[in-house]
Each structure stands twice: as structure tokens, then as C-alpha cells.
Image: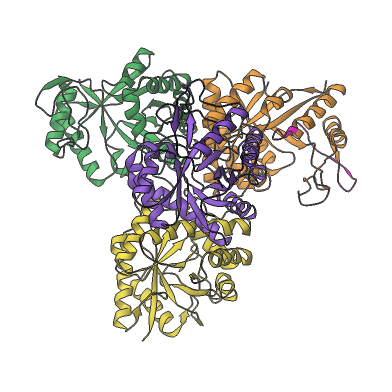
Chain colours: A purple, B yellow, C orange, D green
Amino acid sequence: MLTIDLNCDTGESFGNYRLSAEEEIFPLISSANIACGFHAGDWSVMEHTVQLALKHNVAIGAHPGFPDLQGFGRREMKMAPKEIYQVVLYQVGALAAFVKAAGGRLCHVKPHGALYNLAARHTETAQAIVDAVQDFDRSLILYALSGSEMIRQAQHAGLRTASEVFADRSYQADGSLTPRNVPGAMIESPEISLQQALQLVTDQQVKTLDGKVIPVIAETVCLHGDTAHASGFARNLVEGFAKNGIHVQAPAL
Amino acid sequence: MLTIDLNCDTGESFGNYRLSAEEEIFPLISSANIACGFHAGDWSVMEHTVQLALKHNVAIGAHPGFPDLQGFGRREMKMAPKEIYQVVLYQVGALAAFVKAAGGRLCHVKPHGALYNLAARHTETAQAIVDAVQDFDRSLILYALSGSEMIRQAQHAGLRTASEVFADRSYQADGSLTPRNVPGAMIESPEISLQQALQLVTDQQVKTLDGKVIPVIAETVCLHGDTAHASGFARNLVEGFAKNGIHVQAPAL
Amino acid sequence: MLTIDLNCDTGESFGNYRLSAEEEIFPLISSANIACGFHAGDWSVMEHTVQLALKHNVAIGAHPGFPDLQGFGRREMKMAPKEIYQVVLYQVGALAAFVKAAGGRLCHVKPHGALYNLAARHTETAQAIVDAVQDFDRSLILYALSGSEMIRQAQHAGLRTASEVFADRSYQADGSLTPRNVPGAMIESPEISLQQALQLVTDQQVKTLDGKVIPVIAETVCLHGDTAHASGFARNLVEGFAKNGIHVQAPAL
Amino acid sequence: MLTIDLNCDTGESFGNYRLSAEEEIFPLISSANIACGFHAGDWSVMEHTVQLALKHNVAIGAHPGFPDLQGFGRREMKMAPKEIYQVVLYQVGALAAFVKAAGGRLCHVKPHGALYNLAARHTETAQAIVDAVQDFDRSLILYALSGSEMIRQAQHAGLRTASEVFADRSYQADGSLTPRNVPGAMIESPEISLQQALQLVTDQQVKTLDGKVIPVIAETVCLHGDTAHASGFARNLVEGFAKNGIHVQAPAL
């Protein structure tokens, strides 16, 4: 039977600020990437989100980002690899404490935002993240952009990986995501999005924006949880997978 | 043979800001309480300080404080016990990650500043800290003010404790420290300070500011590391202990 | 003709986090208290909110709070009066820069949350706020709880004041607001709320929770803008004032 | 008579952290660039430093930086020009409030660290800073790297400028500073440094690292105040200027 992981960035509220419709998204997903207090999330949100994940039997991952709450971790910061290592280790450790205290198990790490993008293309950043994850716990799975330098470095170091694909973003001929400012970057139609997701999961291929079909390793699909629209979109995907006999399951569970 | 622990707050630099003469203090102490990034310290400082502690074979403790860098954690913040629990758990987890990555072992937790003082007298705060430490690792030792509510709650919950005393602060008849704004609060003379430390360690007693002798449990002596003066003071104590056959050793090592 | 000011705390979004239905609330109010980046708000939100206020011809006020974004400024912090002075001056200056750059005029200052409550009862805190406002601009109006120490100190120093009352909180016999944890503290009914507001504005009196009628100086009514419910509530008040011939107007405009 | 301005970055302490030997450097300089709480400084430090500047009759400037205390503003952050504008306006306004409250006058603005460097080469960043300064107060003088894009944009907009040169950094043939990682970048010898400063001020020329002599506009010399060494270095320069009949004076005073 075919299986696929559905992951979602969660725990991105902060203090008085609420983000995302998490009560709706948790029943749909198999992996939750929980923010660790640097780009989003705080100690209270982290504890609550870990409990939500345990309640829904969802694999728990740390979702470390740049230390930039105002920019939501979407702004690249010039940090030396050693600092990247430290920033990731700090955040993974903080989240792991909540998981341990709640009697759960930390399963994976997925870098956030600008850190995710930087690690996808920059070898030393990717290596620093790999080192932090390995030094903390060699059994953790690294979730990263399919085909990226992050995946290569993690595999090279012997870490388990989950190659991430997107159902709501179009792909280019070289396998990269179409930049958001290019027309056609976002897939707005739930039907086309489901079609792309099914092709990715079933055939490990995707039809690019210019009509080619290219191979893509698809082990986890990224869902968005920050809008009511998003959870409807997610539900559509989940139902489409079910109808096609694709089982939703986290790699670590 | 008599033994005593000498602990010092360390890792309190931040970014471009250097604090404390740590290269001088580490050879003298047996326990290092390392700041966790909330009242002081950052990811780089934490990694460096953990390495210093391992190099000097000093027991490593987490030193969590209120989330208030500008106030250095010395300003009491009104937080619910549940938030205290979360704030402590977050910081202990973050530091533990650096210890684990460096191949070391986290030995103890000592609350910082206003959190230390609040926990010394406020039952629910003390309980929240105990809960956080226990939920993270029941084998950790809680360092706290001798005779305090923090010690009582930790012992009540079955945690190991280390009762902290001060060589440079005078005591009052009820066993509390003389408030800093009262004349005679600080012991400026190295000789009198050593005398008090020896009495504390040898007799588990102290002569109070008004001349009484009262019992005090003394398991760890707090040294200060933030000035050149402080390390001279510390060296004087260490030499005094050595001359009197008192062995300096961390409770966990 | 009777006039009343309607003020609302605004500009409380931060980075990626949206708070309040400001597009709906601005057409209803005469005074906007704009967060200054310490308890909420950031440089982008401040600029945007100032522009909204100018567009709607609403009097602009600074809304300084404790430096505690995670606690939304609702957590009391132990700060010396000198620090309170500095914290207020910093925030008022930062907001004033956006007002100046946009070609507007800063009209008032209203402390936020725990700082508002502390200043209402603590003389030295109130004085520190008065000093900061006066040293910055003696023509600013201080908005504060009617009958509070904050109002007394401001008037004593010769500052103009606007005594704030609440339409959705019940009053106690001594003129204070019923604490939120006491039954009956919040007025849920729009009709009773409007009735209380009309009584406050028209008669400068209020019926307390235990049925007495006491005098209250009512110069500005606090509206809430953080929920859709809130803007419906506000609209009800505004329409009620209009029907009763009460003109909504800021004291400075 | 020849005059030159000597400026120094000041007010870079934060909370419990002390930086720089300011009591020693203030008697030597004519312009103080005061940190505004983003990369360094806080409300207390700002108030204190403004008072020091007034006491020593030193021209007060705002020294805005990226919002990155841990990185001391030395890490470039990807911010849109609009955000650069807002970040500068916020900080200039906050500092101006302390200057106003102390009865002083804000004279200039000098961007800090990574923002200074970015503005020196990136047109849109430079323009955003110029806009913020102009929208706040058209009479302010912009201090920036001599020959930089920042200077060009400021002059293009009609702002007064002060072209900054360095006595302790060597120059390259194209007029840029030798990057710090290149041998010979730093001038360690007080004599050579003074010689370069005199050549800059007297001849508006500098001898480059490879022996050419090129024209450089020199209106203000940057001194460092963060070490005891630095103040000795500064004193040497000041004495050298005096011996050569060069008067130290801020452009705005």
C-alpha cells in the first residue's frame, strides 16, 4: 500500500497572538513541525501544541528558524555555520524538553522559512543543521525540500530524511519551485493541486509549469494551517488520498 | 573528610557583551550554573560555557531566569505557576541540548535572580520549578537557598537538593540573608568571609548580624564571577578550604 | 451640546500577527491609542496605524506599555520610577516620529495594561509617567482611569487629562471597576452597556454593581477593537450616542 | 583655521552589560552617535548618554541599526526599503525624545554597522534612510562613509552630510576601506594612524595600501570608544590635531 506523510507548520502563535486553525488541521496531518520560540511560538504555545500533537497521535518535529520574531523567520540573516548550528541546537533542545515532559518522543526536525530556503542551496548551512541534529539525536529524521542540498548533506551524514513536496506550488523544469513572484507559482485550484499531489505520491513525478514531466522524490507533503481556506484545502487533499488508497502516515511512527 | 560544593553563575555574556572573568573562576569551582538565554547568555555563550565546564571537570547546571534580558532577570514578573513551569522547562531543555551535544551530563538546576528569590518564599512558584525539573529529569539536583520554600518543595517531591549559603552576605536571626540595603548586608572583608564560610561548612552554623549563632544547612557556597575582585575573593575561599582540609566537590560528580 | 470622546487601543498587531478589526473600528472612534512596539505593535504597524488615524481624522495618542511582548504588557514588572519615565519617553518619542513624518500631530498619551493599572494606584509610577509626558510635550493630554492617582498626579502637574470610563465593565461603590474575576464584572448586554454609557456621559454618574448611584467623571469612553463582537458593540454605542444627541469628539481636535 | 569633527559610537551598553570607556572618550570628541535600543543601548543608557553628551557639549546624533541585539547590528538583514525607513524613523524618534526632554538638540544621524555598510553601496537602502531623516527633520546632518552611495543620495535629496573617514583603517585604490580580512586593513601604529588622519584632514587625500595618493573628502573622523586602548588612540589623534592647529568641532555646533 502507498503511504505518504502530511506535515504542517504548527505552534506559530505567540503570547496574545493566535495563528492558524490548529484544532482543524491536527486531525488531518501525520507530522507537526512545532515552532520553537525564535521565529514564532513561545513556551506556552509549545507546551500546548505538543499536547495537541500527542492527542492526535501526530509525529512531533522541531521547527527551528532564525531568531527574528518580527520577520517571522522569513528574513535571511547572515550567520556563520557555527551560529546556525547553535541556533538549531538550542531550539531543538527547548522543544524536546516539552516533548519529554509530556511523555512523547521527538521524531523529526524541519527548518523554517529563510533557514529552510538557505539550507536548501547552501552547503555549509545544511551541514551545520545536520551536525546540530546529529549531535542531539542521530535517530531524528530531517524534513527538507526534495532534491535540495539539505537532503544531500543529511543523507551524506547518514541521517534519515523525508523529502518534502508541495501540492499548492508549481514546479520548474529543474525541479525547483516556481518563485512566488512568477505567474503560475501558486496553484489555486483544489482539483489541480490534488492532481499534482497524487502524481507526486503515486508516480514520484510532477508536471512542470512548462509542461514537462520530471522525477521528484515525494515522501512528505507540506500542508498549510494558517487560514480557514488552508484547512479546507488540506481536507480536500486528505480525502483525495483516501479515495486513491494512499495511506497517510508519518515516517517515524 | 569534609566536602563542600562551590557554585558560580556563569555564561552570562550576551552577543557582543562580555561578562565575568570565567577563565579565572572555572579552575576554582565545582559547579557552574549556566545562563540559558532568557536573563543572560545566548546560544554561542551557552556552547562555549558548556565546553569550559567540561574542560575543567565542573558539574554543569541550568540557570533559568525570567525572560528579561534588559533587567538581567532581577525584576520580578507576575507569571502564573504554569508559565513558570514552561519558562523553566524551555531553558533547561535548551541548555541540556548543548550539554548532550558536547558529550556531557546535566547535573543540576539553579533558578536565577528574581526567580530564585520568588521561589525561596512562594510555594506555587517553587512547586512549578520542581515540576519542570522532575518532568525533565528526576535525577537533577535543585540548588536553592538554604532553608527556603524552594528546598522544602523539592525535598517534598523527592528531588535531591543542594542547600546554598553565602560567604559574602550576612545572615539574620531568622536565617534569612540581610537585605542588601541594610548596613552590614555585604561582607567586604575576605577574612571575615572565609571565617563565615568555614563556620558554615564545618559546623553547619552561622553567626548572625546581631551576634547569635544559628544552624544553617550548607551544601554549596555561591561564588561570584563577574569581577576581577570576585575571583580574588573566590581564590581566598578556596585556599582557606584547602588549608582546613575541606575538599571542594560537586554533589553530582 | 454634550460631547464625548471614544478611544480605542489600536496598532496592536506585530510582524506576521494580526490583531483587531481596525478597518471597522476607526470610523467609529475619535481617539486612537497606538501601541509603540513594547507590549505590541512594531515599526510597520505603527506607520500604518498612524496613517489610518489620519485618514479617519482620529486623534492620535501614544499607548506605551511594559517591555513585554510575550505578556502583551499585562504583566506587572518591577521598575523604578526612573525606568518607568524612560520607558514611556522612549515609546512616546518613537510614535511621535511616525506622526511627525506623516504630517500629523500627537494629541495624547494613554498607558497600557499593567502600566495603566499600576499608575492608577501608585503615586511614583504616576508621577514618572507625568514627568515623561511633560518633558516631551506639555500640550499632550493624559488619558487615564477616572478618579485614579494617575489623573490626580497629571492634574497636579498641570497636564490636561481625559478621565476614562468603561461601558462594558461594572463599577463598585468606591468608584473602582469590579475586578474581572468577580461575577458581574463584565457587562455582556449591549443595552445595559449603552444605558451605563449614557448615564456616565449625560449625568456623570454610574449605577454600581450593588445598586448605588455614584458620581464619575466621564470624558472618554474606552472601546475595544480586538474582535468582530467588539466592533458591533462599539457601533451600538455610537448609534446610541447619536440618538441621544451626544456628539463624539476628541478633546484635542 | 582647519577644523575637523571627531565622532564616536556611544551608548552601546545594555541593561547589566557595560560597553566602552565613555567617561574617557567624551572629553575628546565633538560628535556622539548614540545607539537607539535596536542593536545596542536601552532607554536607561540612552538617557544617561544624552546627559553625558550635553555635559561635554558634544553634538548628539542618533545611531540607528538593524533590530538585532544578539548580533550587535553587524549582521545584514533582508529588509525592504520601506522597513528600513520605518526602522530608522522609529529609532531616531526614540532618541530625539530623550534629547528633547533633556533640553538638547538632535544634530545628526549615523547608521550603524551592517546598515551603514549596506547603505554605503545599496541605493534603495540609502534612499530609505534619507527619507526617514528628512521626514523627521530636514535640518539633521547625515554622517556616512566618504564617497559612498549614502552620501550621494543624501546630497541629491538636499540633506547636509558629513563625510566620514577612518584613521585606523587603510584605504584601497578605489577609495574603499581595505576589508578587515586583508593584511594591512587595520592600522595598528598610532604614529601612522595620526599621519593618515593629518593627511586626510589637511590635504583631503590619503595614501592607499598600495602606495597611491587619492582624494578623499574628510569631514568627520571616526573614533572607537570600546576599549582602554581605543581612548589612548583617540587621545593621540586629538593631541596630534592640536599640535597641527586643527580645531576639533562638530559641523552642527
| Residue C137 visible from this viewpoint | no
Which of B171/C99 is in front? C99
Q: Is residue B24 above or below residue D165?
A: below
Q: Residue furthest left?
A: D211
Residue at (69% x, 31% y) in the render: C8
Q: Give residue C152's position: percent from left, percent from top.
A: 69, 40
The question of residue C138 being in magenta is answered with no
Q: Quadrant of the N terminus of chain D?
A: top left
Q: Is residue D18 above or below residue B176?
A: above
Which of D70/C134 is in front? D70
Q: Is residue B93 above or below residue A117?
A: below
Q: Give residue A224's position: percent from left, percent from top.
A: 58, 37
Name the quadrant containing residue D69.
top left
Question: Which residues are drawn in magenta?
Answer: C209-228
Q: Residue furthest bottom?
A: B1
The question of residue C223 being in magenta is answered with yes
Q: Give residue B149's position: percent from left, percent from top.
A: 58, 71
Q: Give residue C165's position: percent from left, percent from top.
A: 76, 37
| Residue C174 visible from this viewpoint | yes
Secondary structure that dominates the magenta span: loop
Tell whether A242 sits left or right of D154. right
Which of D211/D11 is in front? D211
Name the quadrant containing residue C138.
top right
Residue at (58% x, 28% y) in the render: A192
